Image (cartoon, rainbow, N blue to C red):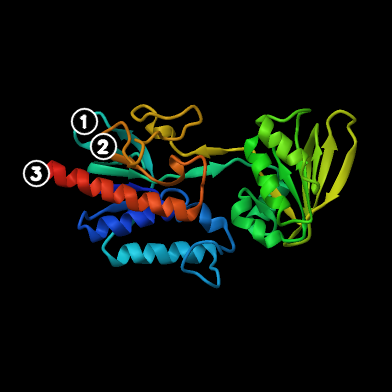
């Protein structure tokens, strides 16, 4: 099966839907494939209170549903399915949908995002799905833990940043570091060490996230040196062990950094392949916020529109 479109958008988070809104209004007739997680990471977020325009907050699934409706209102063709293969070697970009359909495209906007890394233990996944205390974004969710005690897992710069951010909101922050040293830069290490309400536990790993039927109440930990098992009281369990950009299928054609984030041209959303653009967390390893993703989705649609107009002239 073959089909052609002017603009293909891969991914359905804030970046993808915003790109779709702008592309539709520019009469680019975009086709958007939602991927295997329609709505992106925000669909696992209970409350979104830092996205402009929602003074009383909104749930992640509700927000994504509204963005989807807005994109559809302007004519975006939103489809189920995911991209399993690409070929960006020719003038027309080829993508395979579910391995059995080929779509050729004048422009492609990649909005596949990045997935937070988790420990993978059963109790962690339980409370992540319940939305009752497990998070991979302190900036997104820290507000809900004001004056409470929380745990941060990780020993790199991101973990230090998350812990320092939470220390301004929470009564106490405990950092759990699996090895006997940080992986962070000296300036970040000094910052957390000087923060009075941050406690650092080295050689410590998580055995279980404790809680009731809906909320986290503590963490069972193990000291890898002494083998001692103990419990920490906490209402929030924050993971800061990295993100994995969802970009593997593009690595043959696009320039990626050492972690896998797509490298875009400075000041634009252009990649190294003409007609292929990137938005959202697939290229952002710094901010990773819904509002910044939406902003780059707008940029990608405008860049794609300009590219198409130049092709036609």
**Residue on which disc 2 sits:** 94
Crowding at mark 3 (Cα within 10 Å: few <14, some 14-19, many 20+): few
Is residue 305 depicted above or below 46 in this figure? above
Q: Residue at x 83, y 30 (%)?
A: 224
Which residue is located at x 88 percent, y 43 percent? 230
Label 2 CA crowd tier, 10 Å (few <14, some 14–19, many 20+)? many
Q: Quadrant of the C terminus?
A: top left
Residue bearing the label numbered 3: 313
Looking at the image, residue 120 lies above or below residue 62: above
* Discs 2/3, front: 3
Task: Tell me the SS state at disc 1.
Answer: loop
Quarter of the view holding residue 146: bottom right
89 with respect to 56 (left or right)? left
Nearer-N-terminus badge (3/1)? 1
Q: Is residue 33 visible?
A: no
Q: Earlier in the sequence, mark 2 or mark 3?
A: 2
Disc 2 to disc 1, how far (Cα)?
A: 8 Å
Q: Which residue is mark 1?
A: 90
| Residue 269 higher or lower than 255, as above or below | below
Does residue 243 appear in the picture of this structure? yes
The quarter of the picture where residue 278 lies is: top left
Q: Determine the CA span between mark 3 and mark 1.
A: 20 Å
Q: Quadrant of the N terminus?
A: top left
What is the crowding at mark 1: few (fewer than 14 residues within 10 Å), some, or many (at least 20)?
Answer: few
Residue at point 75% right, 28% down? 181
């Amino acid at each position: 099966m073959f089909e052609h479109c002017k603009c293909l958008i891969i991914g359905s988070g804030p970046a993808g839907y915003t790109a779709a809104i702008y592309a539709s209004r520019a009469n680019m007739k975009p086709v958007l494939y939602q991927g295997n997680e329609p709505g992106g990471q925000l669909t696992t977020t209970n409350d979104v209170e830092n996205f402009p325009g929602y003074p009383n907050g909104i749930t992640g699934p509700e927000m994504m549903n509204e963005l989807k409706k807005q994109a559809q209102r302007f004519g975006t063709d939103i489809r189920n399915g995911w991209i399993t293969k690409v070929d960006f070697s020719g003038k027309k970009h080829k993508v395979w949908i579910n391995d059995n359909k080929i779509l050729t495209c004048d422009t492609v906007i990649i909005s596949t995002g990045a997935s937070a890394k988790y420990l993978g233990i059963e109790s962690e996944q339980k409370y992540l799905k319940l939305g009752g205390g497990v998070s991979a974004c302190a900036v997104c969710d820290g507000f809900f833990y004001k004056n409470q005690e929380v745990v941060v897992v990780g020993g790199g710069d991101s973990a230090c940043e998350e812990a320092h951010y939470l220390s301004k909101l929470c009564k106490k922050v405990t950092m759990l570091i699996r090895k006997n040293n940080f992986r962070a830069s000296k300036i970040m290490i000094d910052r957390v060490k000087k923060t009075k309400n941050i406690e650092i536990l080295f050689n410590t790993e998580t055995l279980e996230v404790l809680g009731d039927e809906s909320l986290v109440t503590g963490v069972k930990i193990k000291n890898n040196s002494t083998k001692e098992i103990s419990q920490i009281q906490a209402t929030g369990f924050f993971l800061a062990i990295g993100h994995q950009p969802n970009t593997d299928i593009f690595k043959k054609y696009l320039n990626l950094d050492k972690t896998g984030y797509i490298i875009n041209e400075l000041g634009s959303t252009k990649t190294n392949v003409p007609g292929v653009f990137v938005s959202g967390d697939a290229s952002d390893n710094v901010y990773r916020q819904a509002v910044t993703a939406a902003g780059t989705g707008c940029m990608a649609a405008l860049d794609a529109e300009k590219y198409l107009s130049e092709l036609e002239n």
